[in-house]
Image (tube, rainbow, N blue to C red):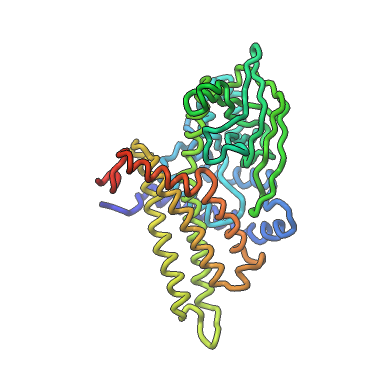
Amino acid sequence: MDFALSDEERAVRDTVRAFITREVMPLEAEVLRRERAHQPGLDHSEVRELQLKARKFGFWGLATPEEYGGMNLPAVLQSLIWTELGRTFVPFRFGGEADNILFHATEEQKREFLIPTIEGERRSCFAITEPGAGSDAANIRLSARRDGDDWILDGEKTFITGGHDADFAIVVAVTDREKGARNGGATAFLVDRSMGWRSEFIQTMGEGGPASLIFDGVRVPHRNILGEIGQGFTLGMEWIGKGRYTIPSHAIGIAERVLQMAIEYANTRETFGAKIGTNQAIQWMIADSETELEAARWLVLRSAWTVDAGLDPRHASSMGKLYGAGMVNRVVDRVLQIHGGMGYTRELPIERWYRQVRLYRIFEGTDEMQRLIISRDLLRGYTKIGGHLA
């Protein structure tokens, strides 16, 4: 059994690390300054400039098929790259991407929505969560009523990432209430902002924030259905599933960065005439963090590996998401504690990460939903203890 990275995986990871170190990390002080002034860390044009620089390195469309100019990288490589992105808090991600379910679009829809999104000319958001339907996504109520060649959408979506900046939304709406969303009663629509929906920004404890989307008699052409009528819930679960290994991959990068900060601080900060790293309390926090970080790394890489191997990734991905999200919260908490009062200030990014990673235990499936999935798979015999090695 070989746990080493291949030459290709190591080369890609090192190239991404070099780009992040040289082009992105130098922006950290300015990002912190802006955020302290309640401004966006980077504006859209600055992110775009970084993405075009990365494109010259060959990094464009990590998951995008080659026919659309992307790299179509395997899941393990994507996981490694997301880890490198997590090593900085600068709000950057590589360009050339589009929501994975947009590839179900018709040729006409691809020209109108998919291609411009990949090229960075349009910005999308995915809207399934509602005030009464968070973890229970099947309980959505936003309705779509057929009216000739159009559909009329009424209702509200909430906590929509990127919803305040998007110029179109992928909206999952109820088209047959008797069937129910889970059983073919929900459909996905591509809805331009110009069609009449509005967004309301939601302030959160983190930087930036999601939005509520309001649909009041919004008329959408039948040709704007994504996929097929009744396929909305299935597409929604496919969209959410993508985050099950990318989010904890990002968490690993954050944990690596903050743990290194803790080690450096423990080796330089003195109290009572000695470096604080000589104190057993500090040593144990560092040891526990490294152990949990390493455990998360292999859970997450295994979940990505199941995708590449063509296996059902849901069980492994739920374990990776559950443990990775919890791990990064515990590590950041310890690192803040090691830094004491300075860790609590906004002069350092630790408190920023502290606020940021709390979300990881909620979005794209809460801890509780991951536990439900994992336990249900075992109790119903969908999987065995030990997974593919059982």
Where residue 319 sits: x, y (%)?
40, 48
Name the residue located 40 percent from the left edge and 54 percent from the top edge: 297
Q: Is residue 194 visible?
A: no
Q: Is residue 323 visible?
A: yes
376 vs 337, left or right, is left
Name the residue located 71 percent from the left edge and 43 percent from the top edge: 201
Q: Residue furthest right?
A: 37
The answer to whether 274 is drawn above or below residue 56 in the figure is below
Tally the marks. Answer: 0
The answer to whether 153 is drawn above or below residue 313 in the figure is above
Name the residue located 50 percent from the left edge and 47 percent from the top edge: 366
Where residue 11 sits: x, y (%)?
42, 51
355 vs 194, left or right, is left
Q: Residue furthest top?
A: 148
Say which quarter of the image contains residue 217.
top right
Q: Nearer the viewer, residue 161 or 113?
A: 161
Where residue 343 sits: x, y (%)?
60, 69
Where residue 83 sits: x, y (%)?
48, 52
Q: Nearer the viewer, residue 287 or 382?
A: 382
Q: Nearer the viewer, residue 227 or 102?
A: 227
